[in-house]
Amino acid sequence: MIPRYARPEMTAIWSPETKFRIWYEIEAHACDALANLGVIPRENAKAVWKARDVEFDVARIDEIEAVTKHDVIAFLTHLAEIIGNDEARFVHQGMTSSDVLDTTLNVQLVRAADILLADMDALLAALKRRAQETKMDVRIGRSHGIHAEPVTMGLTFARFYAEMDRGRARLQLARAEIATGAISGAVGTFANIDPAVEAHVCRELGLSPEPISTQVIPRDRHAMFFATLGVIASSIENIATEIRHMQRTEVLEAEEFFSKGQKGSSAMPHKRNPVLTENLTGLARLVRSGVVPALENVTLWHERDISHSSVERGIGPDATIHLDFALARLTGVIDKLVVYPENMMNNLNQFRGLVHSQRVLLALTQKGVSREDAYRLVQRNAMKVWEKGADFMTELKGDAEVTAALTEAEIEEKFDLAYHTKHVDTIFTRVFGD
């Protein structure tokens, strides 16, 4: 993560200050639960809360860790310095470091998911608005990058809305999947701590107790979470790539908003480049780069090892921060995207009616012409458009084999653009509801 691609709210989740604050809350809530069970004196549990409004000294914790070579012990030592050694003697009672580390990580991922869900809501709202605005703006659909048949710009936006809506549903599931905590002690058997402590801590932190942990929370949960982020990132790239194509000079059906004073090239003053969507393509790659390591983290030795730890210290902040930035950037791109309906129509008409070839093919078969012969008749006239720049309708009207089956009026009727948009409302209802 670098500041260039980070937003403050998401970055704050991964700060040392936030991490240590969560560690503290876990320890304090655990002490409350232990006091409720009569395991430790109530006064000691209350004493831990004396640090409630204290700013933990990150530099001091780092200084202690340089000696102890253990981050949780360094924090506990610093906590004891704040509340007193005697008051702190029951802190971390029956717990192991992973109880603190894993539960904290999941709290952070849940908070990150909440920000990402809000980001997706904003993006979905922008996509829906632009879909409605361009609902019947006809453009050429393409397959293999080649003109196919007419669609509308509204359908393009609606398609992206539906994809992102599925991504949001997946993220909601991933949030639920990751929202567990474990305060189960060494190897997860609760030998030195009552399960009621785990239940209390999880309840206070908005988590569910992990049904069965070892010394760590199972990493298949995290694999699903990061895989979901990767899928959302791919959807971002899918949208970005379409916009990049639309902004190509030869296409220019839409382009990123070019603000006053913006420069496109240090060498060529005329340039207006799709820099935001190109950036989104790169950010998507960064988010996806965390998916395979998360999958590999599922396999740990016996009840635990720490091969997953260094990975998660990197991919946790990086994937969520980059995706947060990417979603916000894409929302801005969609919100201000400049659409050119006239260029869309010019592109559609570039090959002089060729996009209606399927309608003519089907009409011939309905008149009794075999499909093989109908395809041959339509294709031979279509090739004149490709190769000589001919007008498709004119060529069809001049083909005796075609006119033997279709009248000129019937041929002309097959070139009606409205035919291709007659079910747009149906599709919109499927995507957006009534």
Image (spheres, grey):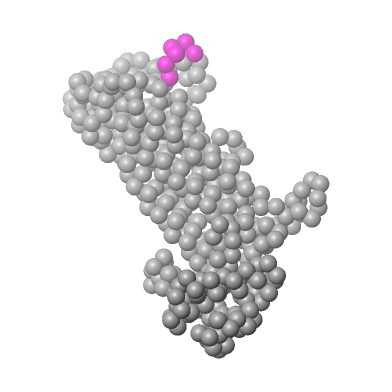
User: Residue 423 or 62: which is nearer the viewer?
Assistant: 423
Residue 12 shows up from this direction: no
Whether residue 70 is in magenta: the answer is: yes
User: Residue 103 or 248: which is nearer the viewer?
Assistant: 248
Task: Give the position of the C terminus as an image quadrant.
Answer: bottom left
Instruction: Identify the main secondary structure in magenta.
Output: helix
Q: Position of residue 175 (x, y in %)?
A: 36, 44
| Image quadrant in which you'd find residue 80 | top left
Compared with 203, 140 (above or below) is: below
Which residue: 58% across, 42% down?
282
Which residue: 52% across, 21% down?
59
Which residue: 61% across, 51% down?
277
User: Residue 145 or 367: which is nearer the viewer?
Assistant: 367
Going by the image, does 24 lie left or right of 184?
right
Going by the image, does 413 lie left or right of 251?
left
User: Residue 81 or 139: which is nearer the viewer?
Assistant: 139
Task: Give the position of the N terminus as an image quadrant.
Answer: top right
Which segment is the magenta one?
66-71
Going by the image, does 267 lie left or right of 131?
right
